[in-house]
Image (cartoon, rainbow, N blue to C red):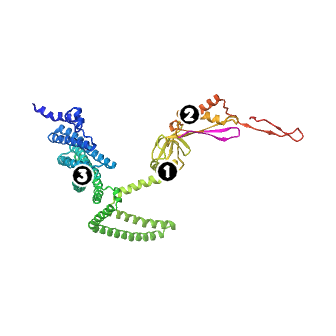
Amino acid sequence: MSSRSSHLIPFAFAAALVCMPAGAGFAAPPAVLAAAAPADPVERLLVELGEAARSRDSLTALADSSSGAGHDFLEELLWKRHLDAHTRLMAVAEELQAKLERGEDVSSDRKRVQAAFRGLWPGYVYQLERRRRQLSALGRTSDAASGSQRLVIEADMTRLSDRVLESYRALVDAVLALERDRIDVTTQRTYLTQGLRDAASGLVARVQVLTRDRATTAAQLARTPASTDLRYALDASEERLRRATLGLSTAIELMDRLGLEDDDLRVALILSSGRITTDVFRWNVAVGLLRAWGGHLAELLAVKAPQWVFQILLVAVTFLAFRWASRAVGRLARRAVRRSQLSELMRATLSRLAVSGVMLVGLGVILTQLGVQLAPLLAGLGIAGFAVGFALQNTLANLAAGALILGTRPYDLGDEIESSGVFGTVKRMSLVSTTILTPDNQTLIVPNSAIWSGVIRNRTAEPLRRVDLSFGVGYDEDVDRVQRVLGEVVTAEEKVLTEPAPVIRLHQLGESTVQFIVRVWTRKERYWEVYWDLTRAVKLRFDQEGIAFPYPQREVTHRVAPGSGGAVETKPGQS
C-alpha cells in the first residue's frame, strides 16, 4: 500500500463516522436490536450515553494520531460527538428527575446513573485537559509568529478557548443536574471547584499582564503609526485581552452557579478590565472596590504628594505675585489718567482693564506651569467666541432640539406628522432641520427648534388607524334598516379589520337629518383607501336601497296682522 493511501485511511474512517449516528455500531438484524434495547428509559439512555462516549473516545485516539487538514476535520467531528454525549447525559438526569416527580422508586436507577457517571467522568476530564493543552500549545506558537499569521492563530485560539469554556459549562450543568437527582458527585464538584478557582486566579493575572502589554503596544504604534507589525501586534493583544476577560467572566458565572464565593474575582475583573458592571451593586464587591481604589490612591499620594505640594506652592506664589503687580499697575494707571481730559467713566474703565490685563497674564503663566498649551487654547477660544457669539445662536438651538428629537424619537422617517402648522411625510432629518414632503409634493425644510417647541402629532406612529365617517339620513328612514345596511357595507370591505370591531351607531339628531357614525380600523397605509372606498360604497348602496340623503330643510311659520284672516302656517319644504 502506498504512503498516500495510508494517509487517506483516517479520512475514510472519519467519513464513515460522519454518516453514522453517535453510538451506532455494525449492522444487526432488527429483531436483535429490538430485543437488545432496554425497556426502562433510564437504562436505555445510559446505554446510548455509553455508546456516545465510546464513539467520542475512539475519535479522540484517531485525532491525536492525525495532523494537517485531517486533524482539523477530526477535531470538529470530535467536538460534535462530545456535545452529543453531554446531551445524552443531561437526558439521563432529566428522565431521573421526571421519575422522582412522579413518585417512582429510583434507588436502583440512581445507583446505575452514579456508577455510569463515575466511569465516564475521566473521559470528560480528559477532553477538557486535552483542549487546555492544545490552547497552551497554540499560545506558544502565536508568541513565535508575527504579522497576519499571528492573527490567524489567535482566531484559532479564540475558537478553542470558547470550547474550553463550553466544556466547563457542560460539566457544571451535569454536576448540578445530578445533584438535583440526589446523586453523590462530591468528587466531581471538588474537581470543578479547584479547577475554576485556579483558572480564575490565572486569568486575573493574565488580564492584568495583557492590559499592560496592550497599552505598551498602543504607545509604540502611536509613535510609529506606519508600522504594520505593530498594528498586527495590537490587534493580537486586544484579541487575547478580550478572550481572557471573557474567560474570567465565565469562570465567575460558573462559580456563582456552584455557590462559591467569588466577590474577590468580581473586584479583580472590574479593576483589571476597567469596565464597571452591575456587580458594583453587590455589597462585598463595592467594599472591595473601595478598598482597592483607596489603596491605589494612598500609593499615588505617597509617590505624587511631594510634587503636587511643590506645584501648589508655586502656583500660590505666582498668583500672589501677579495680584500684587496688578494692584501696583492699577495705581499707576489711575495716576496716569487722572490729569487727562478723559471722562471719569473712561478712567475707571482703563484702570480696571490694566488690572485685568495683568491678572490675565498671570493666569496664562499659571496655566503654563500646569502644563497647558496656551496657543491652541487661545486659537480655539477665539474661533469659538466669534462663531457662538455671532453666527450660531439659532443653529445651537436647532442642534439641541435635533438631539432631543433623536433621543426621544417622536417620529421617524416615513411618518406623517403635523407640527408647526405643516403636515406631511418625514423624508430626511439632520441635527439642524427636518425635511417634510407635503401631500401635494412640496418639500418643506422646517428647523428642529420650531418642531420641538410645538405640538407634534404623529398620525402613523401606530400600525393601525381608525377611519371616522358620518352619514345623515332623513327622519322618515328606518333606523334599524339604515344601521343594518351600513353594517353590510362595512363587512363587505376587505380592507377593514375585524379586530378592533367596527362601531356603527346612531350618533346625533340634527335639524333635518339623523346622523350615523361609522368607525372602522385598518392598517395605516390603507387609511385613505378605506375612507374613499367606504364613502363610495355607502352612496351606491343607499341608492340601491332607496335611502335618501335629505336636503337641508326649514319649517317657517308666517303670521299675518290681526284682522287679515289669521295666521297661515307653511308646510315643511326644501329651502
Residue 7 visible, this angle: yes
Residue 294 locus on image (x, y percent): 30, 65
User: Label 2, on which residue?
Assistant: 491
Q: Residue at x 44, y 49 (%)?
A: 407
Circle 3 sits on which residue? 217
Q: Is mark 1 on a helix, strand or loop?
A: helix
User: Horizontal and vertical percent for residue 560?
Assistant: 85, 40
Compared to residue 530, the image places residue 242 above or below, namely below
- The amino acid type found where label 1 is placed reads Asn
**Amino acid, disc 3:** Thr
Q: Which badge, 3 or 1, is on the more N-terminal residue? A: 3
Kindly identify which residue carries mark 1: 394
Q: What is the span of residues highlighted in magenta in the rendered image? A: 500-517
Give the percent coordinates (x, y) of residue 146.
19, 45
Q: Mark 3 or 1, which is nearer the eye?
A: 3
Q: In which quarter of the image is the C terminus?
A: top right
Question: Where 331 falls versus 451 (above or below)?
Answer: below
Camera-side mark, 3 or 2: 2
Q: Gap in Å between the C-alphas at discs 3 and 2? A: 72 Å
Left or right: 541 in relation to 34 = right
| Mark 2: few/some/many CA within 10 Å (<14, 14-19, 20+) | some
